[in-house]
């Protein structure tokens, strides 16, 4: 149920979409900061709601927006927590101080999904405050299994998975890297509360309805706040980039189909504003969903064309025939795993649509279906 571990490293994707005229930037301060390559300020969005940018070290996404809610009866609720590092912890705690609150006042933490930039600080928040942590059962279970399996098992499973996609074993081993690099991802907080689709989070004074949106991870949650009509989109819908959708050794069989279905689920919610976990707030969820859907359909056509030109190829080989943001020869390590597992996600959707057929066996190759 876990996405490929490199996705656990919080890299959400790097595909820039064409400008979308029907998407209106409402987080103009966030957007201005982005252009200036600066961290945006803590912002008060409503009388009882704030966004706190928490930096992600050495990552092109730069920061995750933690949302802090004042709760009826006192105390705070957080949505997401930030990357598990001292620098991020300092930003979160000083952000809370700047709004006149303290980490010890946190009563509950909602986590959109299991990636390290969202869940990474949750255990530290829980230790400091006694807060509960809530996630969707699919991601909560994945975290528990990762923790039980440990870093070495995670590395072995990922290497085997990549070999099954056509990687040379030596290259897969070097791309995945040593288990030491995985250790923080196998010791994250295990949620103590579960939230299913349609349930309301225990944030007194708010009506935060969980919307299960599998795709980026199997248990990704968005939250629709029913009084303010604010929509907290996590990594499911971002204003600038397309979130990474890829296969993994313990992930969904068809994550791109899940993702496109999840886009359709949120398309017509017509929120007053979208508050994503990265980049900036915006209006125009339907237009943004349409652009993301069109991007993947375009990518599916490109892949189908590559398979027609290079029949009998593995996902590893096919990735080299697609266009990427830089020359394929420069791809290595996590970037390459990223690209290959994303290609594999597109392949699986083409297969489930009956457009391509796999050879079977330990390292399947792919050919266009004859119909
Ligand atoms: Zn993220």
Image (cartoon, rainbow, N blue to C red):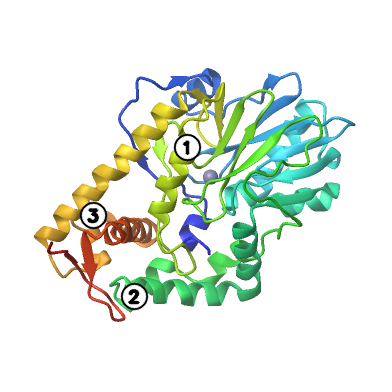
User: Which of label 3 and label 2 is nearer to you?
Assistant: 2
Observer-nearest residue: 206 or 163? 206
Observer-nearest residue: 33 or 239? 239
**Farthest right residue?**
73
Give the quadrant of residue 164. Answer: bottom left
Q: Residue tagged by mark 3? A: 328
In the displayed structure, 95 sits above or below 251; it is above
Tell me residue 68's x, y (percent): 72, 33
Q: Earlier in the sequence, mark 3 or mark 1?
A: 1
Q: Is mark 3 within 8 Å of ligand 1?
A: no
Q: Residue at x 30, y 72 (%)?
A: 167
Q: Residue tagged by mark 2? A: 163
Q: Residue tagged by mark 1? A: 237
User: Which of label 1 and label 2 is nearer to you?
Assistant: 1
Is 117 placed left or right of 131 in the picture? left
Distance between the Cα atoms at labels 3 and 2?
A: 19 Å
Give the quadrant of residue 174. Answer: bottom left
Secondary structure at badge 1 equals: loop
Secondary structure at badge 3 equals: helix
């Amino acid at each position: 149920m876990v996405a490929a571990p490199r996705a656990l490293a919080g890299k959400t994707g790097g595909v820039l979409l064409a400008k979308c005229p029907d998407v209106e930037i409402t987080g103009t301060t966030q957007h201005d900061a982005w252009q200036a390559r600066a961290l945006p300020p803590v912002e008060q969005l409503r009388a009882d709601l704030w966004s706190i940018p928490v930096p992600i070290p050495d990552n092109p996404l730069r920061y995750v927006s933690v949302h802090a809610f004042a709760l009826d009866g006192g105390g705070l609720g957080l949505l997401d927590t930030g990357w598990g590092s001292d620098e991020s912890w300092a930003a979160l705690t000083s952000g809370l101080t700047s709004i006149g609150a303290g980490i010890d006042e946190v009563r509950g933490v909602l986590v959109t999904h299991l990636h390290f930039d969202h869940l990474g600080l949750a255990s530290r928040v829980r230790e400091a405050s006694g807060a509960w942590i809530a996630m969707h059962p699919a991601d909560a279970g994945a975290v528990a299994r990762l923790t039980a399996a440990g870093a070495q098992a995670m590395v072995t499973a990922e290497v085997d998975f990549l070999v099954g996609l056509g990687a040379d074993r030596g290259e897969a081993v070097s791309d995945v890297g040593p288990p030491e690099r995985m250790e923080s991802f196998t010791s994250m907080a295990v949620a103590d509360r579960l939230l299913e689709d349609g349930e309301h989070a225990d944030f007194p004074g708010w009506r935060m309805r969980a919307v299960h949106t599998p795709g980026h991870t199997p248990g990704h949650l968005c939250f629709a706040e029913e009084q303010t009509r604010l929509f907290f989109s996590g990594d499911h819908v971002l204003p600038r980039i397309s979130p990474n959708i890829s296969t993994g050794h313990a992930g969904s069989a068809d994550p791109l189909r899940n993702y496109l279905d999840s886009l359709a689920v949120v398309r017509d919610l017509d929120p007053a504003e979208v508050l994503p976990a990265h980049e900036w707030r915006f209006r125009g969820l339907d237009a943004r969903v349409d652009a993301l859907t069109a991007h993947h359909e375009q990518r599916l056509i490109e892949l189908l064309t590559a398979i027609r030109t290079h029949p009998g190829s593995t996902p590893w080989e096919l990735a080299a025939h697609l266009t990427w943001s830089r020359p394929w020869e420069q791809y290595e390590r996590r970037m390459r795993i990223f690209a290959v597992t994303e290609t594999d996600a597109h392949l699986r959707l083409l297969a489930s649509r009956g457009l391509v057929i796999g050879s079977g066996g330990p390292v399947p190759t792919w050919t266009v279906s004859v119909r």
